[in-house]
Image (cartoon, grey):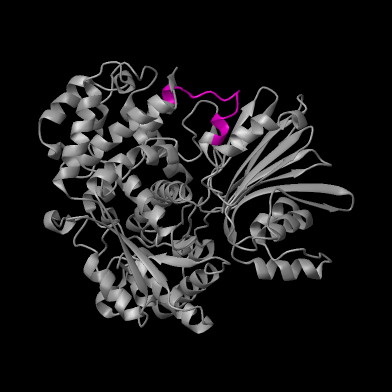
Amino acid sequence: MCGITGWIDWERDLTQQKQVLAKMVATLVSRGPDDEGYWLSPRAAFGHRRLSVVDPAGGAQPMIRERDGRRYVLAYNGELYNTTELRNELIGKGYKFKSHSDTEVLLCSYMQWGPECLSKLNGIFAFGIWDESEQTLLLARDRLGVKPLFYAPLSHGLVFGSELKALLAHPEILPHITEEGLAEVLLMGPARTPGHGAFKAISELRSGNCLLYRRQGIKKEKYWSLVSKQHTEDLKTTADRVRELVVDSVERQLVSDVPVCTLLSGGLDSSAITAIAAAAFARDGRGPLHTYSVDYYENELYFQANEFQPNMDKPWIERVSDFLGTIHHTVNLSTTELAAALQEATRAKDLPGMADVDSSLYLFCKEVKKGATVALSGECADEVFGGYPWFFNEEMIKRPMFPWVSFLEERIGLWNPTLFRSFHPREYVEKRYLETLAEVPRLEGETATEARQREMFYLNMNWFMQTLLDRKDRMSMACGLEVRVPFADHRLVEYVWNIPWSMKMCDNRSKGILRRALQGLLPTDVLDRKKSPYPKTHHPAYTATVRGWLTEILSDTSAPLYQVINPQMLKTILAGSVDVFDRPFFGQLMRGPQLFAYLIQLNIWLKEYKVVLE
């Protein structure tokens, strides 16, 4: 995994602009702590920061290759999981390889097939390829959006990068935010409309999309999308196929020349990945698998079960680790460091995020990095198989709104009512919801229930899953840790997309088809465990800390937060109970304390990024 950035300019000689490119590259050091590289030509300049995972000696970037008198240059962030198959196919076409890196295989794939190579790739990636002869740039992002890629037009060119901060380091890209960008942060956040870059003029290349840039302009194309069709296989065949795909995905993602671990919560998804990985380690003689989990000091004293978080992870982690014989490490965090890390989490994301859910992940990854460079994680299973409570709650299913959004009117009331002049805040959120529904690939003949569940899956994969993948990428890569997500394998996603809802919840259980598919890999009680999300702190000291910090911010009327809030409303909330949001206002975890922390992050972001509201 790496950090990439680049600059195309049709007028300036970019060979004289290394100083600017170096500033852009410097923002990505955390993503690639092992090496850096540059390539500059009059019209195109690429920069790269490298995290060495496969072939440390042979995978240096930007990578340059020539064929038939044409020069191609690649800056790439990601990992291909079908490198061997692609390399063998290319060798059959006359290619000779200087390394065993997937970087070289990707570049040669483009040289052979052009943009059509994207349909052949199995992996997580974001990259830019410059064709020097044709003077064209191809930007591409993986099918599920695991790896990020932003771009922005210039007066006579274009810049791109792995993170917003890389673009903001360019002198033509200013930290300005329009009314629409503000709506993304204040109304949609910590989610973000697919393709929206929040800052003025910045866009994010959407998942499954590529972009071709030449003098004539930008041409975007969606090279992958879900296709709805009838599922004709019976229950047993379906479970067998799901198991085959999950096992193959995990085993492919264990490839690495550096230490690999799994993130283990004791839930179904992470336990399944750990079981498959542990078996592969034993088979290949790689020694015992190391596993990691996160917890909080004294959390067991204050934990209270609820519908979103029914039990604590600790006993389940011990159960799975003992059963599989892994070497387990628990990272315990204090409320003090959790609150302090809100600042680093904001810098990692370049936007306000999921509050302490982000800062805890950042601190967790920082500790994991001490023992491993690659980690496998269970993200995406709930979106792909239907594991969240809102897939089963009739009220949430029928409500014509994003199911993870609650208290929208109360949230709107937090903001300065003069901020939104050209649209009503609720209408903005509803518009984004309806835009997404318009994209859903429909299946003729479905019942109303099946059609609505298909909408729910599409909403979750295009919004909630993107938010969690975004969070996982930024917090982990800020620590130089590569996190892989086997449940985001596009082959698995394509297959499960068309499994009927009644079969997905076979045995009348959430993710029933996945539980069936995994029988024999894990103890029955682990397979039957009810979903419990990423753990958060329940310690009252944390609530007191963020309440005090936010109160201190509000005592200074020159604080940037004052530009956007309704101070009286916020002071009323601070003076009362944090249970003003008695259910999460976003997702499953973000309640009163997380609201305070989100507002703290908002103030940090406005101040440190010198955000200008237009």
- Is residue 52 shown above or below 25? below
Q: Quadrant of residue 109?
A: bottom right
Residue at image point 75% right, 30% down:
14
- Is residue 571 shown above or below 208? above
Residue at image point 58% right, 38% down:
26
- Is residue 402 shown above or below 487? above
From the viewer's perspective, tell me whether residue 143 is left or right of residue 470: right
Magenta residue check for 175: yes
Q: Quadrant of residue 97?
A: bottom right
Residue 586 seen in the current view: no
Position of residue 302 measured from the top left corner of the image (x, y, whole percent): 12, 54
Position of residue 300 measured from the top left corner of the image (x, y, whole percent): 15, 59
Residue 425 seen in the current view: yes
| In the image, farthest residue toward the right | 69
- Is residue 128 shown above or below 181? below
Residue at image point 18% right, 20% down:
568
Q: Which residues are magenta?
A: 166-180
**Considering depth in this image, is 557 or 225 the residue closer to the camera?**
557
Magenta residue check for 429: no
From the viewer's perspective, tell me whether residue 279 is left or right of residue 309: right
